[in-house]
Amino acid sequence: MDLEGVKFAVNPFDAIALEEALRIKEKLGEVEVVVATIGTEETVEQLRVGLAMGADRALLIRCADTLDSLAIAKVLAAVYQRERPGLVLMGKQAIDDDSNQAGQMLAALLNIGQATFVSKLELLENQQRARCQRETDGGLETVTVNLPAIITSDLRLNEPRYVSLPGIMKAKKKPLEEIGLAALGVAVAARTRYLKFECPPPRKAGVRVKTVDELLLKLKQEAKVV
Amino acid sequence: MAKILVIAEHDQGRLKQATLAAVALAQKVVAESGGSFEILVLGQDIGAVLEDLRGYGAAIVVSADDQRLCHAVADKYAGVIAEVAKQRGINLVVGAVSTFSKDVLPRSAALLDAGMLSDVIGVSAVGGDFEFRRVMFAGNVIATVTLEGAVKVLTVRAAAFPNAGKLAEVSPIVDFPLTDLALPAFTEFGGRETRQSGRPDPTEARVVVSGGRGIKNAEDFERLIGGLADVLGGAVGSSRALVDAGITPNSLQVGQTGKVVAPDLYVAVGISGAIQHLAGMKDTKVIVAINKDLDAPIFEVADFGLVGDAYQVIPELMEKLKK
């Protein structure tokens, strides 16, 4: 797929995850918020957005290859071992690939708990556990998960703040560390190989009807669905 | 030769129909390239679901019945699925697209060191391995993809695999012993809040009536969208805007980040038709759009479009349908 000239932006679910981390920091005080991503110098801009929103420091894991979810989870597992965070917040899915896998895989690799599609988060018992409301097909579910855990954000968790000008100025002074996969001690490659991309056939243009009677006639006699 | 494990999904003993799409994929692979498939049911007191699944041609139906599995908590479920797959020499684990599968199966995949593909809509055997087709970019791209590794995990879109046909109920039920298996306990289930409406789930209904920004509050949604759905014997759905506004529950959201539906009839009422919404419903057979704005993009995908105010059109439609 030709992505030349495409402008990349922070995944909205990741912005929600970061916003939640910032709110936890604002509430508790003694919290460091680190933003991390895997990519190239083109990804630095997104990390700067994270710093401008309020993260304390940023970590760019240098990798020019396109990784799949399992490879990403393995890289993030190495980052986790290096940073030892008390909580990992991630977006529930990327909005290009739509896979919705990496967070759950990371939790498995680390053998820690997970709460996915979270729309409400509350830290309990001196940050030992987190009570999470999850958006599931059957409705809202509540789970309490031991920390550290992987928590993935859904749309309703919060509304991310805008980046302010002072935020952008401050971000320039915040540390942004780059680290290679070799330095992290991981060797990964994607197992998924994309052979071909196609556009699904477009739906054929329909007709406009003027009245409810005409609509009912079409549905009954032409489409035969009512 | 493929040995497939289908993960059955159920809600308090009632089989989710989408499971049968995963069964249909397994049947297709076995019919075309040999091998066999098994169906795994996890939970507590799952007898009815096990019986239900004996008639689809599975070599066996595996029962993981344990008190610790009474709620579908990812750490426990993923652990059991990975253990069953390992012990039974499985190389393809398949589930239907749902929040259950999205939560549990990636965790199983990582435990099995297996790659995973989400939203699969096609599979074909090519030179001893498989080529899969999957949906990405909010449904705007269909990719053909291969996946390396001895074990692969998939979620399949229900619309792409019409429900499996039922055969004689012959598959034996085999217990998978769990008593000696240590299961993680990172998570404590607290409960589930459902607004009982008596209507079907939008992913399982033949007709879905969906409301968007054109509907102003919860009462109007129930009266107009719920009312029309009841007349048509269908389910209700919602655009993201109404969920964000607190008018509808999240479980009704149709779209890229919500549910994907493909009913025979989808009635979009006061929905503008952003691509994120279209991603969740454009495989519908017949789309009807009702919107005040004659330039709304929903009209570009609708088979039948009616420009008008939902507050006038829907009551008239209900009235005339009842006759």
Image (tube, grey):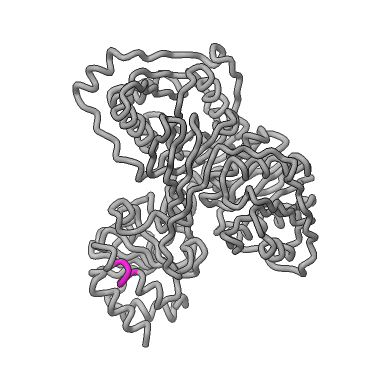
Residue at the left extreme of this rendering: A165
Classify B283 as above or below A129.
Answer: below
Residue B308 x, y percent position in the rendering: 24, 70
Q: Nearer the viewer, residue A129 or A92?
A: A129
Classify B158 as above or below B77.
Answer: below
Residue B202 x, y percent position in the rendering: 46, 63
Q: Residue at x 37, y 57 (%)?
A: B249
Q: Which of A35 and A187 is in front in this view?
A: A35
Describe residue B214's horizontal placement relative to residue B147 as left or right. left
Q: Is the magenta stretch mostly helix, strand or loop?
A: helix
Q: Which region of the structure is painted magenta?
A: B221-225
| Residue A94 visible in the displayed image | no
Residue at the front extreme of this rendering: A125
The quadrant holding residue B180 is: top right
Q: Nearer the viewer, residue B213 or B219?
A: B219
Describe residue A23's horizontal placement relative to residue A4 as left or right. left
Residue A5 x, y percent position in the rendering: 37, 29
| Residue A176 visible in the displayed image | yes
Q: Residue at x 55, y 59 (%)?
A: B159
Decide whether residue B223 is among the magenta residues: yes
